[in-house]
């Protein structure tokens, strides 16, 4: 009888097992390569944002102001100085090729129409504001009670994974802001003290390059912010993260400003850490310095070194080899 060529069942199972082992060995390498690519993209995002801040400083002679507070979004008719209610992200839009987004509502005198234009702005996400290790650049839900004074409320708004360094204050969330443009521009309105905000951008700041006396390469400008993973999609309820609940073009609050009083931390499920820097990356977060360079900062950095890096003018020496 002629014997037919072929695999036995045992041989087939052995081959399948070997293939499974090879795949299991390759998957970590593939995942590692993908995460390396995501880290690179995240670093590039920060580089673009930092350079935009430097162009802003060159153009206006000060770094982007922090704006008024969380009840206000950016207004294209209010300039770039203390009159501007929007924060640092809004103020650099013209310098990341988003001038059209920045100018939505420009020159509109009808209040209702302008509020609708600014609502459209709040709904517009930007890829440069999203770390790909964390989430895609899509609009997500703000807090249920978010109600900006100068814009209509949207159910889904742009978010950001990056924050400006306010220095080492105890909190980076001072107030909602005045009740009207007239009140905010008036000479009698009582703004809170920002004496402990010794970083680059904070409420109604106008920090100049000359005020960065500790050296531009030794001072944080921007960095990745901490965010708990179960809030990446903007969920409310038990997953709610109060450091990620308003539109990216809002004024000064914890969503867009962080403090180096608190050591950096990797994102953790269910853990609130709304004042500090952090990221989804395994080894550390990215920080952009005031000279435009971007550096990986380890979570194990000496807390005192981290604090000093956030302060622009304390005169404390920093050993660059320690971070």
Image (cartoon, rainbow, N blue to C red):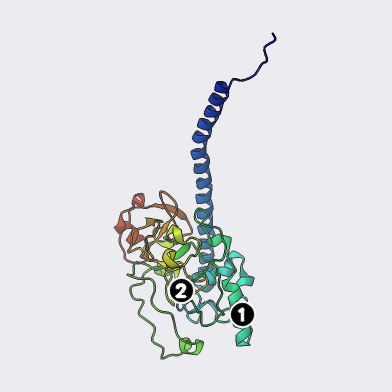
Residue with the mark numbered 2:
66
Residue 276 point in image, percent of width and height: 37, 63
Residue 125 point in image, percent of width and height: 58, 65
Above or below for 200 versus 114: above
Q: Which mark is residue 249?
A: none
Front residue of 182 and 209: 182
Residue 112, picture quadrant: bottom right
Q: Earlier in the sequence, mark 2 or mark 1?
A: 2
Query: Could you tell me which quadrant the N terminus lies in?
Result: top right
Badge 2 element:
loop
Q: CA distance from mark 2 to mark 1?
A: 23 Å
- Tell me if I can see residue 289 in this picture: no
Badge 1 element:
helix
Residue 309 point in image, percent of width and height: 36, 60
Farthest residue, direction front: 1
Q: How packed is label 2: few (under 14 Cα within 10 Å), some, or many (20 or more)? A: many
Residue 13, picture quadrant: top right
Mark nearer the viewer, 2 or 1: 1
Farthest residue, direction top: 1
Give the residue displayed 40% in from the left and 49% down from the top: 283
- Seen in the image, is 12 located left or right of residue 302? right
Above or below for 117 versus 111: above
Give the residue displayed 61% in from the left and 71% down from the top: 101
- Seen in the image, is 221 located left or right of residue 79? left
Above or below for 88 versus 108: above
Front residue of 179 and 190: 179
Q: Which mark is residue 116?
A: 1
Q: How packed is label 1: few (under 14 Cα within 10 Å), some, or many (20 or more)? A: some
Residue 193 point in image, percent of width and height: 35, 79
Above or below for 150 versus 201: below
- Tell me if I can see residue 219 in this picture: yes
Count of marks, rendered view: 2
């Amino acid at each position: 009888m002629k014997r037919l060529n072929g695999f036995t069942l045992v041989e087939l199972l052995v081959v399948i097992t070997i293939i499974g082992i090879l795949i299991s060995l390759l998957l970590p390498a593939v995942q590692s390569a993908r995460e390396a690519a995501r880290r690179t993209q995240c670093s590039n995002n920060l580089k673009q944002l930092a350079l935009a801040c430097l162009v802003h400083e060159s153009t206006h002679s000060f770094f982007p102001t922090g704006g008024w507070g969380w009840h206000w979004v950016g207004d294209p008719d209010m300039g770039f100085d203390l009159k501007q209610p929007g924060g640092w992200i809004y103020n650099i839009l013209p310098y990341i090729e988003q001038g059209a987004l920045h100018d939505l509502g420009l020159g509109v005198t009808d209040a209702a129409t302008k509020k609708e234009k600014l609502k459209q702005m709040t709904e517009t996400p930007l890829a440069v504001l999203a770390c790909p290790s964390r989430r895609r650049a899509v609009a997500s839900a703000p807090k249920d009670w978010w109600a900006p004074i100068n814009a209509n409320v949207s159910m889904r708004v742009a978010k950001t994974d990056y924050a400006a360094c306010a220095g080492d204050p105890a909190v980076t969330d001072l107030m909602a802001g005045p009740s009207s443009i007239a009140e905010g521009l008036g000479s009698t309105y009582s703004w809170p003290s920002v004496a402990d905000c010794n970083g680059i951008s904070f409420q109604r700041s106008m920090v100049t390059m000359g005020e960065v006396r500790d050296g531009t390469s030794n001072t944080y400008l921007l960095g990745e912010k901490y965010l708990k993973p179960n809030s990446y999609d903007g969920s409310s309820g038990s997953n709610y993260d109060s450091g990620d609940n308003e539109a990216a073009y809002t004024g000064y609050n914890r969503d867009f400003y962080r403090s180096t009083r608190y050591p950096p931390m990797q994102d953790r499920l269910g853990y609130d850490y709304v004042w500090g820097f952090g990221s989804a990356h395994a080894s550390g977060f990215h920080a952009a310095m005031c000279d435009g360079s971007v550096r990986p900062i380890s979570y194990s950095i000496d807390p005192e070194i981290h604090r000093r890096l956030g302060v622009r003018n304390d005169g404390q020496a920093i050993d660059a080899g320690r971070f």
